[in-house]
Image (cartoon, rainbow, N blue to C red):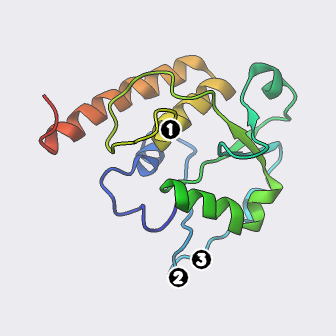
Amino acid sequence: MHSGEWPRSSNTGRLATLTLQNAGIRFQGSRDYPLKTDDLLERPGSLLTLFPGCGAKPLTPEFIATLPRPFTLIVPDGNWGQTKSMMRRLPMMRQTTPVELPGPRLSLDRPRRNIFADRMSTFEAIAQAIGCLEDPAAEDQLLDFFTVFVQRFLLMRGRGS
């Protein structure tokens, strides 16, 4: 997570770590918390980075079947410029397999406005990736939770009904 993203109340990456059992946050761009990634590179199985950029493989059942298990999924969290910078500047990212999602499956409200229809929040992306990699029912549960979270978030901000 880009360190500038942490204090934002609309940060859904932090929400994912509160919701998912094996999720964690590592900060990028903070002098107080230097990024440590050596332990990630030592993990068995497939090290995947969820980022829709050049060379990213679509998370299809056929592609997933070719990957050794278990999966470690890295999800850069920040605005689009921050995440592009992380992908470019962090040497560890070049040692992962970049993967991408087909796009938002649902038309959901989000904590932040997005001018691009093909982009989604970090939480949505993680939920969809879990649906592809592990279990579609888990994705449905996460998105149901997220829908309630966003409704309440928008209500607190005076934008909900």
Q: Residues within 10 Å of mark 2 (few under 14, many from 20)?
A: few
User: In the rendered image, which residue does mark 3 sit on?
Assistant: 34
Residue at far bottom of view: 31
Q: CA distance from mark 1 to mark 2?
A: 29 Å
Mark 2 is on which residue type? Arg
Mark 1 secondary-structure assignment:
loop
Q: Earlier in the sequence, mark 3 or mark 1?
A: 3
What residue is drawn where x is 75% and y is 41%? 56
Q: What numbered label is drawn on residue 31?
A: 2
Q: Residue at x 30, y 54 (%)?
A: 9
At horizontal 51% and vertical 64% (from top left) the residue drawn is: 2
Q: What residue did someone put label 1 on?
A: 119
Foreground tag (3 vs 1): 1
Residue 140 x, y percent position in the rendering: 48, 20
- In this rendered view, identify the residue nearer to me: 36 or 7: 7
Q: Mark 3 packing: few (<14 Cα in 10 Å), some, or many (20+)? A: few
Task: Say what secondary structure mark 2 lies in.
Answer: loop
Task: Residue at the far top: name it.
Answer: 137
Q: Is residue 83 above or below residue 156?
A: below
Q: Is residue 73 left or right of residue 104?
A: right
Q: CA distance from mark 3 to mark 2?
A: 6 Å
Q: Give the tally of numbered discs.
A: 3
Q: Residues within 10 Å of mark 1 (few under 14, many from 20)?
A: some
79 left or right, relative to 111? right
Q: Are marks 3 and 2 in contact (CB under 8 Å)?
A: yes
